[in-house]
Amino acid sequence: MSATRQKKHTETGHWWILRIPSHWEIVPFKRLVDIRNGRDHKEIEQETGYPVLGSGGVFAHASDFLYDGEVVLLGRKGTVDRPLHFKGRFWAVDTMYWGKIRNGVNGRFAYYSAQTIPFDYYKTNTALPSMTKSILGAHRVCLPPLIEQTAIAHFLDRETARIDALVEKKRLLVSKQQDRLSSLLQSAVIGSATINRGLDQNWLENLPDSWGFIPLKHLVRVKGGATPSKDTISYWTGDIPWVSPKDMKVDLISDVPDHVSEPAVLNSALQMIPAEAVLIVVRGMILARHVPICMLAVEGTINQDMKALIARKSLISPQYLQRMLQGFSDVLLSYIDQAAHGTKKLRSEALFSLKFPVPPRETQDLIVQKYEAERIKTGLLVSQVENSINLLTELRASLITAAVTGQIDPITDRRHGSTNRALEKIEAEMAQ
């Protein structure tokens, strides 16, 4: 590359010095693309007769009504984590901007430049809930001659594809490990039994002699939940955890963001739920994908979209109850219905009448211990892989930034070969 010069200016509230080739420019992003507003998805549906495939910042295409060209799609409210480059007919909904590529600009170069825009910074450092068109257009980026833009775009297409392929392999590894753990749990809680077709009361055959086949309602006591009035501030200033479906992302719940007070429990339909209760979501769109099941580590409360199952310990341990239900997640999904307004719901009456295989307590404890050991081992492996994915994601971002700011020669990859060596090492490890 040609000789470099230093340019200094304010960016995202901080002073920084950027070394760029002397013949490059620093320009507002609107010099690369003509930024335009997306449109309300209902308005588009009415005019075109085509359904918009998701209104929350998702774009759809293949309509004669739409602009046909090369664009960069950008999230207005953070709904698109990474800008999208698109060629063809499209529409952009009202939670997005779209930028028509200007003459003399390589579309892929504009796309990669857009990935260096710190959307999160602008969202948190303005009084507005989303990035404005003026802020987006004024963001400063580098602009090399078209021939160099094209070379940089080709280089980044090649190198980011290598990184993306590695990330995909690692995500597949995580998925396989999670599937393996799920299969192990299902095998453990089913014993030597076999599943019949259909889900009648005798849906299992050939249970071990020492195992029982007991309706869920005989294994647990059930408590429901509620939401205290949001208008009474004092109800929401206590220290009693109030669990809702959004909190059901962990195996063991020790605390949650929302808390209620004792008056809230006394003056509403809330019930105190004891520690070691197994919580299950019985209503909500999450049930379209899976049935969240967690254990409550401390005394707390729940909202109305959940049930708390309190194990009858003479028959089943709380820990085994949790693992048993998780192991039969496919069975639980078969009891999901859709309410009139579209919300998913678990048919509780049928579920609690369903019989489950229950081994003796000592066998329950052994199954839980073995599964816990496997879960910890799998968790450590998954954590390592996810850390590796994060490092690859950071490498991808730094590579893009270096290339579009002139810190790397796309022809020779003159950055001491660090990127290639790092990727080659990871590629070799994944090939083993």
Image (cartoon, grey):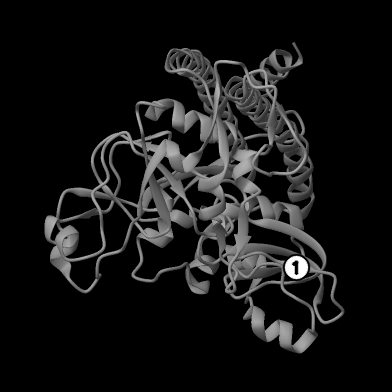
Q: Residues within 10 Å of mark 1 (few under 14, many from 20)?
A: some
Q: Nearer the viewer, residue 6 or 116?
A: 116
Measured from the top left, where is residue 339 in percent x and y? 58, 68
Task: Assign a secondary structure to mark 1.
Answer: strand
Residue drawn at x 51%, y 24% is 383
Measured from the top left, where is residue 320 in percent x and y? 45, 26
Residue drawn at x 59%, y 20% is 188
Corner quadrant of residue 430: top right
Q: Is residue 289 visible?
A: yes
Q: Is residue 416 visible?
A: no
Left or right for 66, reference 393: right
**Residue ranking furthest to the bottom:** 47
Q: Nearer the viewer, residue 68 or 201?
A: 201
Residue drawn at x 62%, y 81% is 40
Corner quadrant of residue 346: bottom right
Vertical placement of 123 versus 202: above or below? below
Residue drawn at x 82%, y 82% is 65
How many numbered callouts? 1
Measured from the top left, where is residue 203 in percent x and y? 69, 37
Q: Quadrant of the C terminus?
A: top right
Vertical placement of 204 versus 406: above or below? above
Left or right for 88, reference 42: right
Measured from the top left, where is residue 427 in percent x and y? 72, 19
Residue located beneath label 1 in the image: 60
Left or right for 303, reference 271: right
Left or right for 372, reference 88: left
Q: Quadrant of the N terminus?
A: top right
Q: Nearer the viewer, residue 384 or 17?
A: 384
Vertical placement of 71 versus 300: above or below? below
Residue type at numbered disc 1: Ala
